Amino acid sequence: MKLKEFKSYLVMPQAAANYLLRNLHFFGFLASLVLVYIYVVHQGQGRVRAYQALQQDVKEMRSKYLKMRSESIVNHQQSEMTKRLVDFERPKNGSVPHIINMP
């Protein structure tokens, strides 16, 4: 292909060039709207990811709370207290009892 033929493809007709120049401000406005749209979508997706991470944290904390609560209820029952106290030495008659420190 000759160089002159290739250049003929790059040349725009005068009517098309005039149309583009007359509506250049409109194309710039559309381009700015596209950029604003991309920014808003990006920010929205970031907020959704942060919200989902917080939801996951709340679920984990709730499960930890329920586990600790159930363990606490079981450990403070009288039967569990007596099981733990059996391991300590019983004071002999007339001796001072040991102080029991609860963990």
Image (spheres, rainbow, N blue to C red):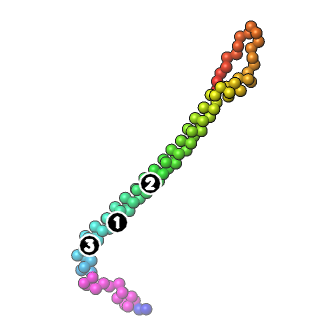
Q: Is residue 5 left or right of residue 64?
A: left
Which amino acid type is marked by label 2? Val
Q: Are marks 2 and 3 in contact (CB under 8 Å)?
A: no
Numbered badge on residue 34:
1
Numbered badge on residue 56:
none
Is residue 83 positioned above or below 97 on the image? below
Question: Could you tell me which residue is drawn at 57 percent across and 39 percent down?
Answer: 66
Which amino acid type is marked by label 1? Val
In reply to whether residue 27 is colored magenta, the answer given is no
> Closest to the observer: 12 or 95?
95
Q: Secondary structure at mark 3?
A: helix
Picture coordinates of residue 86 (x, y %)?
73, 23
Q: Secondary structure at mark 2?
A: helix
> Closest to the observer: 85 or 98?
85
Q: Which residue is mark 2?
A: 48
Looking at the rendered image, the quarter that the C terminus falls into is top right
Q: Which residue is mark 3?
A: 24
Q: Which residues are magenta?
A: 3-16
In reply to whether residue 10 is colored magenta, the answer given is yes
Q: Earlier in the sequence, mark 2 or mark 3?
A: 3
Question: Could you tell me which residue is drawn at 23 percent across and 75 percent down?
Answer: 22
Q: Are marks 1 and 3 in contact (CB under 8 Å)?
A: no
Is residue 28 positioned above or below 40 on the image? below
Q: Earlier in the sequence, mark 2 or mark 1?
A: 1
Which amino acid type is marked by label 3? Leu
Picture coordinates of residue 102 (x, y %)?
64, 24
Q: Is residue 65 left or right of residue 77?
A: left
Alpha-carbon span between mark 1 and mark 3: 15 Å
Alpha-carbon span between mark 2 and mark 1: 21 Å
